[in-house]
Image: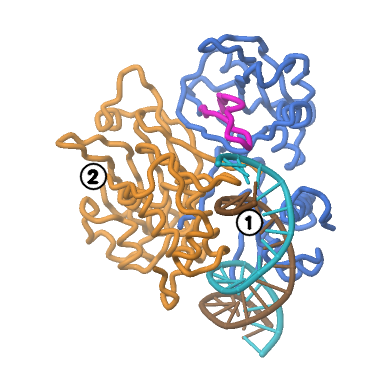
Chain colours: A blue, B orange, C cyan, D brown
Amino acid sequence: MLDKNNNVPLYVQLYRQLREQILNGEYKQGEFIPSETEVMKAFETTRGTVRNAISLLVNDGLVQQLRGKGTLVLLRPLQYSITNFGGFTDYLNIRKEVGVSKVLDLRIVSLEGERFYKLIRARGVKKGDTTTYLMIDTSILPVSLFPGLDQYDFEKESLYQVLREKYLIYPNRTEIALSPVSIDKQTREIFQVHENEHALLKAEGSIFDQNNIEIEKVKIIYAPNIEFNIMTKLN
Amino acid sequence: MLDKNNNVPLYVQLYRQLREQILNGEYKQGEFIPSETEVMKAFETTRGTVRNAISLLVNDGLVQQLRGKGTLVLLRPLQYSITNFGGFTDYLNIRKEVGVSKVLDLRIVSLEGERFYKLIRARGVKKGDTTTYLMIDTSILPVSLFPGLDQYDFEKESLYQVLREKYLIYPNRTEIALSPVSIDKQTREIFQVHENEHALLKAEGSIFDQNNIEIEKVKIIYAPNIEFNIMTKLN
DNA sequence: TAGTGGTCTAGACCACGGT
DNA sequence: CCGTGGTCTAGACCACTAG
């Protein structure tokens, strides 16, 4: 049910519930979720609200709407879409995967006269007793915005969860540039890259909060076995 | 003005007009476009329609909405966002750049028993009398869908314009995977790549029409001087 | 023909920014 | 305080799909 007194918008509440049901497998790949009208009645709201919620699912690439037919579930195995910059752990959580983070470095650095935390993590998934690393994340965060950030253990806690819960800062928007990068020795070991691979994909950019303040600079290097997928609508 | 008898939806008509005004420079980088209420009155429509139009601009990364303030123009120099897969020429047109295409190969190939056109083009921009190539595009299109496609001159005509105007097929959705790729000799010459660059960015995937029929397989290799940018909203 | 998503209207109240 | 975008309501008609 939706809670009108909650300050989370109704359509976001509805989006989360529908997403949960899809990821739980209540609606499976290739099936249709209930029609907009049915959802509207079930949750006692209006179609506009339902459509707002579903459009978030479409953005996530979780469903696809077909006129005259219905709203189809599109669930594929582990897949990296452009929505993932906002938090690896969050992403794994909604996909019900077990994430692993290994902190390679955490120190304070100075850039242009300002002090930043520099956090480097290798991140991956655990299946049975083998861990596969999927990306190496470098995060640069201003000390002034996040005093005491180094007291958290980012092998156990999610960076974005800490930002939200302890610093009340909500990542809102990313600007990321993609490019290839050649493989250094440490990276080759972490990812166990085959010898005939010479380059990996790198994403580099900034993350902004709801007030358009830059809260984090990121650099992510992706393992070669990652499918970096993008789905777009053309206008 | 908007034409209610046109079968292009009002919000798409409005989107196109606003986009035109932004790209023409009527609203400049850092300025606000008229408020939703003003646009609503000026075009004699409702706010829902205005918001649909503006949300397309937001998707394009052309504007950004700020509550309590207004809708801000975000225009940056030549930049490749994820909306570009749908057509290089179209993209340049809306950016008022002069595009150049050079056909490297056009032939019929057989894949899994079906015949396809395979079109390879180097594509770039012309500034003064120097041409800079930005990408090498390989397009694979089924002969059955596009009979006679090889009669067109794709150094002069846009592939997507031909698909729309001659074959009445409208690209609607893309699924693209990004990865790094090492540079071969021909590519190195076309892009005039520096010797210490060893890898480029490759995008590979499929394009679907409005009925979710796969109309084209694409492979695009990007020049090293291309900024491949992505802007996303986080939920 | 019945049901679906796509579009549009005409309102309303809210949180937020700047005056 | 007023104007902004954010959210929500309660309808309407349409094009499309499928039985």
Q: Whole-percent x and y of residue B50?
A: 52, 61
Q: Which is closer to the viewer, label 2 or label 1?
A: 1
- Horizontally, residue B171 falls left or right of residue D7, namely left
The answer to if A149 sits in the magenta stretch is no
Q: Quadrant of residue B171?
A: bottom left
Residue type at mark 1 is Ser
The residue beneath circle 2 is B100
Q: Quadrant of residue B125?
A: top left
The residue beneath circle 1 is A55
One can see residue A83 in this view: yes
Q: Provide the secondary structure element on which disc 1 rests.
A: helix
Residue at 31%, 36% (x, y): give it. Answer: B134
Q: Which residues are magenta?
A: A202-223
Residue at 36%, 21% (x, y): give it. Answer: B197
Give the alpha-carbon distance from disc 2 to disc 1, as whole Å.
37 Å
**Which chain is disc 1 placed on?**
A
Q: Whole-percent x and y of residue A152?
A: 77, 18
Q: Provide the secondary structure element on which disc 2 rests.
A: strand
- Horizontally, residue B128 falls left or right of residue D12, namely left
